[in-house]
Structures are given as structure tokens and as C-alpha cells.
Image (cartoon, rainbow, N blue to C red):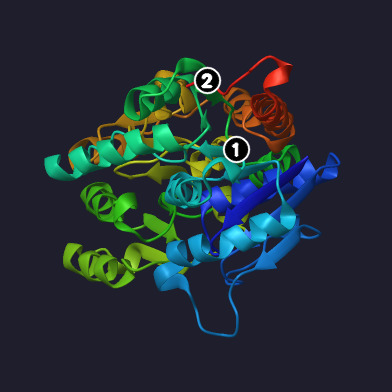
Amino acid sequence: MRILVPLHSFEPGGSERVALRLARAWRDSGHDVRIVLGRDEGPRPAFADGLDFEVLQRGSFSTAPFETLWMIAGLPARLRDFRPDLIFLPGNSYAVVGAVLKLLMGGACPPLVLKISNDLCRRDMPALGRAFYRLWCRLQGCMLDRFIALTPAMKRDVRRALGVAHDSIAVIDNPVLSRADADAIAALRRATARPHAGRRFLAIGRLAPQKNFALLLRAFARIAGPEDRLAIVGEGGERLRLERLAKQLGIEDRLLMPGHIATPEAWLAGCDVFALSSDYEGLPAVVLEALAAGLPVVATDCSASMATLLENGRLGRLVAPGDVEALAAAMDRPLVPDPARSAAMAARFTVERAAPAYLRLFGALGSNAQAQAQPGLGGAHVSR
């Protein structure tokens, strides 16, 4: 099977890292996988070694400011060259790429499979913005062929938001880890001494409005003692704003912001509580990494998947998005989970489990598309 995967870059992003893990597993299963990369920027993870990459960027000029338009302009020629059996769109931000390809190519466009990587309810948006976003979701439902939800709860939201048939949505646990990753995180946590005074709180993510690290700073400021520390591992456009806020709150000497770190396992091993303060998410990889480490987790209920991940409060504390008092109280009194139970949840979301499920879906979709193109085979079609 020929599978094409468009990616904007190697820059930090959970959807891109998951796509590369899957592509590696599909290639190792004997399939022909090509990654079309908008620009060769950001650190390439080790598990991407050996994959077939084609880079659209030419020269040193960065196409980041218009990366989606760049991807749309460059993909049709690559499709004609590679002739894939299907295109895997690894996250919500790639839906527009698939929709425009379908408009440009019509019936010549290969089947498009979109993994829903983020919340579709978008309660963070103003009412008018949500109305336009709902319209865009409905257009996706008309233009794309199959959808991947990350949990059964998310499937209900996807069906309602996109207006598609039940059987056009598959549920596949998001493969944010490999078994080796999960085991290594747990082993490092067990082997790491934590003799520090005070508590160590950790958050990981892009410094972007979606992550609402300002909420986390305010919650930390309410409960932090003199020896407590908060580390936010990640980089992005919100850095200066967050640094100013930390100074206003009087916690700048207790805040660590080391930037993006490709392998944050040592930070997970050395902290006491993991915190997620996002306004919206799909299925946060960082929460699963924290569960693999056996960490107490405090998180906002920022997606349909969060209750599943934390087993409705048995593996961590959930609070309403944007509620600084509730987040502070949960951070001050975190739930210490059963490490074995946390590890079992993390083990569900491994590439070894997910990659074969994707391939079964792709095989069925390819068979349907072939039958649709040959009416004599019985007129099978892709259901909506």
C-alpha cells in the first residue's frame, strides 16, 4: 500500500510526532510510505530515521508564515508522482489541505483520512467564531472520506460536529508512545532520587494561548511555598507575556522555562505533580507520558477524552477549564494514583497497538474505493 503523509515541519507538535511514529511502523510492516515535508525545520526525532522524505521548501527562506498554502500548492505534483493509495492527514490543521485537494482534483484525489487531533466543540471561541467553526466542520464532513477519533467519547463529538455517518468514524487510541518509551519513562522515574525541598510542578507544551499557561501561573502563585518550583517546558510566542505575568505575581524566582526539550523524560522523572491547564485539547500526549511515569496529574477537563484518560478521577484530578481556584486547590492536594493502573492506561496508547488498526482501516477504505471505481465489482461505496 502507498501512503502519503503531509507534514509542515519537524517543529514540536504532538500530531507530527505521532504521524512519524505511525509512518515508521507502517514502513516496517512493508508498506510504501512517503512524508511530504513543507520545510525541513525543527529537530528530527530519532524514530524518523529511514523514512522517505520529500521537502517542498527550496533554499533557506522559511515558508512557515504561509505553510498551509505552501503545502496545498506543492502536493498535487507529488501526488501525480507517487500515486498514493490514500492520504493520511495527521491532525485538524491539515483538514484544509485535504479539502482543497479534493476541490482541485475531484475524483482523481485519493481517499483522505483525517485524524481528529483537537477538540471540535471549541468552547474557548466567542459565539460568532464557534458558528463559523461549526460550518467549517460540516464542510470537512462533506469533503473527506474517513475520520479517526481518539476515544469513544470523542467519536460522539466528531459525529455531531461533522455531521457524518457513524461508520465513517473509527476509534483508534492515539499512539503517542512506543512500549519502549513507556517502559523507559517508568524506569527513569523509579531510578531518580528526588531529595529537593518543596514541591516540583511540571507542565509541558507550546507557549501558545491554547495551553493557557497564564492560568497555571496564577494557580501556582496561590498555593506555592518558598521552596516550591514550577517548570514549563516548551517554547512559543507567549514567552514574554508569561515572564511578565510571573514577575507581576511575584513568582519569577520560582519559575523555570527552559524552552523546548526534545526528550523531557528527565523532567518527568524529577517532578512531583504534572499539570495541564489547556483551554482545549484532543488527547494530550504529555498526560500519557505523565501517567507512564506514575505521576499525580492535575488537568483541566479540556476535551472529551480527558475523563477517559484519568478514569473519571481515579488517575488524577479534573477541573473546569479557566477555573483558577479549582486548579490551585487540585495542585495543592493532588491525587496519588496507583502506578500500575496509570501504566496500564499509558500502555493503551502505543504505536504497536495503533499501527495495525490504522492499516486495517486503510485496507478496507482502499478496497471500497477500488470497487467504487469498477461498478462491475458490485458498486461498493464509501459510506457517509
- Compare residues 334 and 20 and report the one nearer the observer: 20
Residue 135 in the image: x percent, y percent?
Answer: 26, 37
Q: Nearer the viewer, residue 124 or 300?
A: 124
Q: Residue at x 69, y 43 (%)?
A: 22
Mark found first going from the N terminus, 1 or 2: 1
Circles 1 and 2, Cβ within 8 Å, touching? The answer is no
User: Can you see residue 375?
Assistant: yes
Name the secondary structure under disc 1.
loop
- On the image, the x and y values in percent for residue 140 come to 40, 38
**Residue at numbered disc 2:** 383
The quarter of the picture where residue 184 lies is top right
Q: Is residue 10 left or right of residue 298?
A: right
Against 286, residue 228 (above or below) is: below
User: In this view of the protein, which residue sits in the foreground, 118 or 252?
Assistant: 118
- 307 to the left or right of 332: right
Name which residue type carries label 1. Answer: Pro
> Are there few (<14), some (14-19), or many (20+) residues within 10 Å of tag 1?
many
How many numbered tags mark residues here? Answer: 2
Residue positioned most to the bottom: 60
Q: Is residue 365 above or below residue 277?
A: above
Q: Quadrant of residue 155?
A: top left
Q: Secondary structure at mark 2?
A: loop
Identified by mark 2, the residue type is Ser
Residue 353, image x, y percentages: 71, 29
Residue depicted at x 72% and y 18%: 376
What's the residue at 29%, 73% (across, down)? 240
Q: Nearer the viewer, residue 319 or 56?
A: 56
Q: Position of residue 250 (x, y in %)?
A: 21, 65
User: Would residue 371 be found to the left or right of residue 126 on screen?
Assistant: right
Q: Which residue is label 1 attached to?
A: 111
Q: Residue furthest left?
A: 127
Q: Which mark is residue 85?
A: none
